[in-house]
Amino acid sequence: MAEPVTICEVAPRDGLQNEAAFVATEDKVRLIDLLSATGVRYIEAASFVSPRLVPQMANGGDVLSGIARRSGVVYAALTPNLKGYEAAMTARANEVAVFAAASESFSRRNINCSIEESLVRYRDVCRAAERDGMPVRGYVSCAIACPYEGPVVPEAVCRLAVALLDMGCREISLGDTIGVAWPEQVEMLLDAVLRQVPAAVIAGHFHDTHGRARACIRKALELGIRVFDTSAGGTGGCPFAPGARGNVATEKVVQMLSDEGYETGIDMGALEKASALIAQLLGRPA
Ligand code: HMG
Ligand code: MG
């Protein structure tokens, strides 16, 4: 039997947060409903951050109340602080994600605080989530390199991964935010991280700026990672990470995994419909 790999679909959040076009609530709802029909079990549907800084995500509450929730699918939301957490609770997100960075400069530009200050905020979010029985996922951005500081040492990533797990995150997604990783760097990073935490709680989040994301995923698979964040249509990027291109496309990863004998439970025909809708919404060729 094929070995299962979990795909976390991030198109409605990472995929749209950096687009010039604002995607209307009803269109995001249509997109998420199409994604829900693909068989994927995890959809990052919204982000409760400053609407002044990231206007593309301002309609998260309406989006979460408009979607047709499918049983067995987790609809998650990014939350930078308690205010975002409360908004995600009100919107009935099934899981929240906190996002720390392994570089000081990116932390400041992205969430306007130091790494240590972000951990204090995330501890508050995790405490509230524990009280409410809400699962929390943790991100470590700039796990390979920072757009402002350059290469990031694996120890900085390990320290944050351990801190986020200690405060209650159920899983840590390691983000190559600007998509510069080579497989050898992924190996060095995972060698260090997996000395301290089990592979079962680590996910890979690769942007595909230079077309190497699938090679990096292959390396991570070799080292025991079985959860990957991907974006239908390959859209994505971060407004605070200049040069970052799209997340690796879900369809490319699902095809690669299927060719290599892994099972994602995702139906390619249904996925193509979701990717075609994104292309249409963003005015791009399908
Ligand atoms: P701040 O200015 O330090 O926060 O922003 P503040 O507490 O001083 O509040 C300032 C204003 O923001 C106030 O409004 C607050 O109410 C409001 P005002 O009184 O001026 O009208 N505010 C909020 N509004 C809505 N939701 C909230 C919220 N919090 C405060 N949760 C903050 C700090 C983090 C909010 C801000 O810097 C921010 O929103 N940053 C955006 C970060 C972001 O969305 N980045 C992209 C996602 S991360 C990413 O893409 C990487 C990832 O994909 C992984 C990878 O690729 O590596 C995850
Ligand atoms: Mg990202």
Image (cartoon, rainbow, N blue to C red):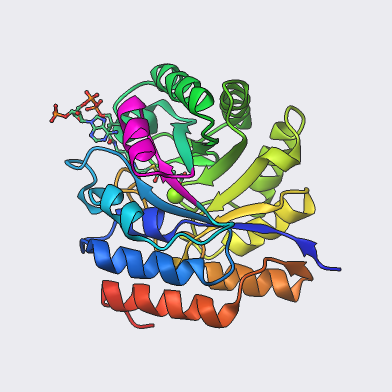
- Figure quadrant of the C terminus: bottom left
In the image, is residue 286 above or below residue 215?
below
Span highlighted in magenta in the image: 75-94
- Toward the viewer: 238 or 73? 73
- Figure quadrant of the N terminus: bottom right
In the image, is residue 223 above or below residue 12?
above
At x 78%, y 54%, the residue is: 222
Residue 248 shown left or right of residue 49 in the figure: right
Residue 4 shown left or right of residue 153 in the figure: right
Location of residue 8 by image quarter: bottom right
User: Can the viewer see residue 245?
Assistant: no
Residue 152 lies, in percent from the top left, at: 53, 34
Residue 243 shown left or right of residue 162 in the figure: left
Residue 227 lies, in percent from the top left, at: 65, 52
Location of residue 281 by image quarter: bottom left
At x 57%, y 42%, the residue is: 173
- Toward the viewer: 189 or 73? 73
Q: Is residue 62 magenta?
A: no
